[in-house]
Image (cartoon, rainbow, N blue to C red):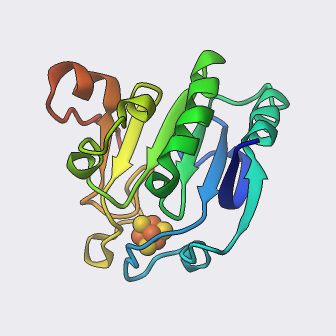
Amino acid sequence: MELIRVAGIINDSIVDGPGIRLTIFTQGCYHHCQGCHNPHTHDIKGGFQIEIENIIKMIDDNPLLSGITFSGGEPILQWEKCAIIAKEAKERGLNVVLYTGYLYEQIEKLPNIEKLLNCVDWIIDGPFLQEKKSLLLKYRGSSNQRIIDVAETLRKKEIVQLEIDD
Ligand code: SF4
């Protein structure tokens, strides 16, 4: 049985992407952004472990979902586990969003990362920067963060950002 370490899971988020979403807050983060809203997610050994199968069941049990979101914490630290869940979500026709404090240009260099990238619709990248914080931005905390259309980025081999009305 495959386990993923999480800080928590909510299955009715309306702020982490379009529609109603199951949001998985992965546990562990090394970025230490000043002003982070989720400092309890930083400890790599904190939170709790849950079987991936149980998360899939939570997805199946909620017919109202438009998609799932990986937030944190830093989901890329457990990207292989996120990829398993993301693949299951895509097979169910759900949209997949992943937040990361890394830049896309850093993530795309990881070996075998296409397993994840092929199953994610949007990556919202970059650390939270207090000096660029804005409450007006949709789906983001600070204006340096980009909403990246992953399929188009893979196709064009250059970063394609989504224009979302804030
Ligand atoms: S990446 Fe996210 S969870 Fe990690 S310190 Fe920055 S804002 Fe907090």
Task: Name the residue nearer the viewer: 81 or 142.
Answer: 81
Query: Going 72% across and 53% down the picture, which residue do you hit?
Result: 9
Query: Going 40% across and 63% down the picture, which residue do you hit?
Result: 141
- Provide residue 136's location: percent of width, then percent of height: 39, 58
Q: Quadrant of ligand 1?
A: bottom left
Query: Going 63% across and 45% down the picture, which residue do you hit?
Result: 14
- Image quarter where the N terminus lies is top right
Q: Is residue 146 left or right of residue 8?
A: left
Q: Is residue 143 left or right of residue 156?
A: right
Task: Name the residue nearer the viewer: 130 or 106.
Answer: 106
Q: Is residue 64 left or right of residue 157?
A: right
Task: Name the residue nearer the viewer: 25 or 137.
Answer: 25
The single residue placed furthest to the right in the displayed view is 61
Q: Is residue 18 visible?
A: no
Image quadrant assignment for residue 28? bottom right
- Provide residue 148's location: percent of width, then percent of height: 30, 38
- Provide residue 83's location: percent of width, then percent of height: 52, 36
Query: Going 51% across and 42% down the picture, which residue do you hit?
Result: 80
- Provide residue 69's location: percent of width, then percent of height: 57, 43
Q: How many marks?
A: 0
Q: Is residue 89 visible?
A: yes
The single residue placed furthest to the bottom in the displayed view is 34
Q: Is residue 112 above or below residue 124?
A: above
Image quadrant assignment for residue 164? top left
